[in-house]
Amino acid sequence: MQTSDDIIDQATLWQLRQPTLDAAGWEAFVLWLEVSPAHAAAMDRVALADRLIADARPSAPAAGIPVLPMRSQARHSRLGALPRRRIGWGIAGTAIAASLALLLMPLALPRGARPYVLTTAPGEHRTVRLGDGTEIAMNGGTRLRLDHADQRVAVLDRGQAMFRVHHDEGKAFTLVSGNLSVRDMGTVFDVTRTGDRLDVQVAEGSVMFQPDGDAIVLKRGHALTAREDRHSVALATVAPETVGGWQQGQIAFVDETVSAVFAAVERRYGTKVVLEHGLPERQFTGMVALSGSADRDIPHLATLIGAKARRNGEQWVLAP
């Protein structure tokens, strides 16, 4: 069983590694955070230690106190085989070790950051309210990264969320997803991240897509689809009242692929659907009203698109 000292050590090393993490590294970091509330608490302690020493940073190590070579440790250790170096401090313990480590490395996060992660499993729905009054409804299969110290920034790694943003003239709310971002301008909007694709729909107010680049303003009833790897952006219009309709089981599609339709079904129910023989790229336009039962809705949708559905264990298979 891990001790609290072990977890603090790991949290310190994660903070050191964050500037160089790739997508797989971030995935591993989030999984580590989700293992136990103690892991998230440890990250909070590391950030707190930094804040406590920020105004009392010594010019040199105190006599008799060894300095840990944290950079060398990080380079030569692997995730899952973290260094176990222990030094007797006399009057303190792991908290001082964490503080000294922070003295020796550039911070991976803004000073005082207290990051945390919210996730939903496929088929699970969750609504959270931030301290500034912003409300976020999360569809199934969604992962958001937030910060207790800055509630005006959110990162959507995957899935779908509906944002009802409390407008603040002094600081806009910004949603980041990959290399793409959306800045609130007093808004209710829905965002979906699937692979490299980002979909934004605005129900109220307006947002700005890529505020530091293209600066595309989307107003009520506007929609945008962007693909990072193709560097493409497509604009469209939607009925504002249908934005976020997934919360009531009402989902509108206009010239969408069948694969996108069943991706929405999987988020809603958590039921895997396999599409065969050209079905994924077929086009679909219409309003889907989900009944609350995947076993009822999936065969019905199969009929609508001219396919046959069969059950295969825990998943459905659709073929022309």
Image (cartoon, grey):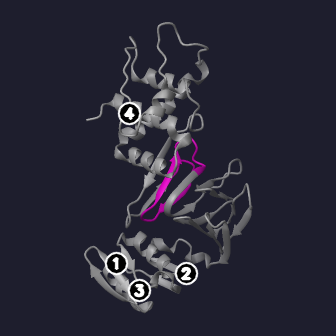
Alpha carbon distance from label 3 to label 1? 10 Å
Label 1 or label 2, whichever comes before in sequence order: 2
Alpha carbon distance from label 1 to label 2? 20 Å
Question: Which residue is depicted at the point 58% across and 43% down?
Answer: 150
Alpha carbon distance from label 4 to label 1? 44 Å
Question: Which residue is depicted at the point 67% across and 60% down?
Answer: 186
Residue named by callout 4: 82
Spot occupied by residue 191 in the image (x, y as percentages of width and height): 56, 65
Question: In this view of the protein, can residue 10 be seen by the observer?
Answer: yes
**Which amino acid does the dot numbered 2 rest on?**
Glu
What is the crowding at mark 1: few (fewer than 14 residues within 10 Å), some, or many (at least 20)? some
Q: Quadrant of residue 311?
A: bottom left
Spot occupied by residue 72 in the image (x, y as percentages of width and height): 49, 27
Q: Secondary structure at mark 4?
A: loop
What is the crowding at mark 4: few (fewer than 14 residues within 10 Å), some, or many (at least 20)? some
Residue named by callout 2: 256
Label 4 or label 2, whichever comes before in sequence order: 4
Q: Which mark is residue 294?
A: 1
Magenta part of the chain: 129-153
**Which amino acid does the dot numbered 4 rest on?**
Leu
**Which amino acid does the dot numbered 1 rest on?**
Ala
Q: Nearer the viewer, mark 1 or mark 2?
A: 2
In the rendered view, tell whether residue 233 sits above or below residue 11.
below
Label 4 or label 3, whichever comes before in sequence order: 4
Q: Secondary structure at mark 2?
A: strand
Residue named by callout 3: 301
**Which amino acid does the dot numbered 3 rest on?**
Leu
Q: Are the residues tagged 3 and 1 within 8 Å (C-beta)?
A: no
